[in-house]
Image (tube, rainbow, N blue to C red):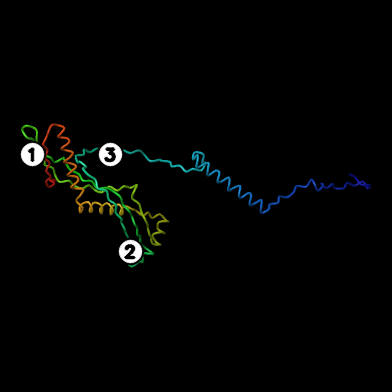
Amino acid sequence: MNDESGTDRPQTAPRSARIPRPHFSPLRLIAVALLAVLVAGLIAVVVGWRPSLNPFKERTIDRSSPAVLRSLEDLSEYHAAGAHFEVVVDLEEDTRWIPSALKGERTLFVGVGTVDSMVDFSHLGSGDVVVSPDRRSVTINLPNPTLSSAQLDLNRSYVVARQRGVLDRVGGLVGGISSDKGLYQKASTKMTDAAKQDGQVIELGKKNTTAMLRGLLGALGFTDVKVNYTADKR
């Protein structure tokens, strides 16, 4: 409005029309934090109940190429028995005159695998199978069973602990890759050696092969089946 002198005075807004500044009290902050925790917990419960509702769930994308057939082989070895082994490999690699804390690696590895007892039928000749004139008896001469290379079960074999020197750890950060091939080879060799020294898997291979041949030839009418094991002819 105008005063008596005719000049305009600036109009000021009433106190009730001013925008109040927000005021955050400690209690309000605590309440907001508790609400956030409750919401997060509710989301976790829902996701655990219905995993498909989790918007941040991880996924695995398989871009591997399909397997390609390279060759076919005729198998003439009968796997008659299998021995299961578990071996602990403690392998250490160090550098002479350098402390292991600086340069070196020690790995504790548990290997689980099997060694098979196999009988080779590919070298049987006409004189190795003798049939009686009445076709009631048969004598079969077989080579002694041999042992296969140990096959590691990668799902059950694992590294227990690995200690690396400072230089090896730094090398790993810049692209150095530590290979566990030596661990697998060492575990495989130990299993095969244990099977050779034990001898039970060889005897079980003979027993199972004899039972298989007697059952097979018995179904063909043979009442007397003898199986002899000789030295490997190969």
Residue hosting label 2: 95
Amino acid of disc 1? Gly
Of the numbered discs in the image, which one, if any, rests on residue 142? none
Amino acid bearing label 3 = Arg
Front tag of 3 and 1: 1
Return the disc, 2 or 3, that comes first in the chain's sequence. Answer: 3
In-front residue for pair 51/233: 51
Q: Nearer the viewer, residue 26 or 65?
A: 26
First in sequence: mark 1 vs mark 2: 2
- Whole-angstrom CA distance, mark 2 to mark 3, is 41 Å
**Residue 217 coordinates in the image, percent (x, y):** 14, 35
For marks 3 and 1, the one nearer the N-term is 3
Residue 16 percent coordinates (x, y): 80, 46
| CB under 8 Å between discs 3 and 1 | no
The local crowd at label 3, few if under 14, some if 14 to 19, many if 20 or more residues have their Cα within 10 Å, is few
The residue furthest right is 4
Say whether residue 30 is left or right of residue 127: right
Q: Residue at x 39, y 61 (%)?
A: 167
Q: Which disc number belongs to residue 70? A: 3
Work out which quarter of the rendered image holds the N terminus and state it. Answer: top right
> Which secondary structure lies at badge 3?
loop
**Helix or strand or loop: what does disc 1 sit on?**
helix
Q: Looking at this view, name the residue that lies furthest to the left.
A: 133
Do residues under tags 2 and 3 come within 8 Å of each other at their CB atoms? no
Q: Residues within 10 Å of mark 2 (few under 14, many from 20)?
A: few
Horizontal side of residue 232 vs 174, given as left or right: left
Measured Cα–Cα span from mark 1 to mark 2 = 59 Å
Report x, y in % for residue 214.
15, 37
In the displayed structure image, the side of residue 21 where residue 69 appears, left or right: left
Q: CA distance from mark 3 to mark 1?
A: 36 Å
Badge 1 is on which residue?
127
Q: Residue at x 66, y 52 (%)?
A: 27
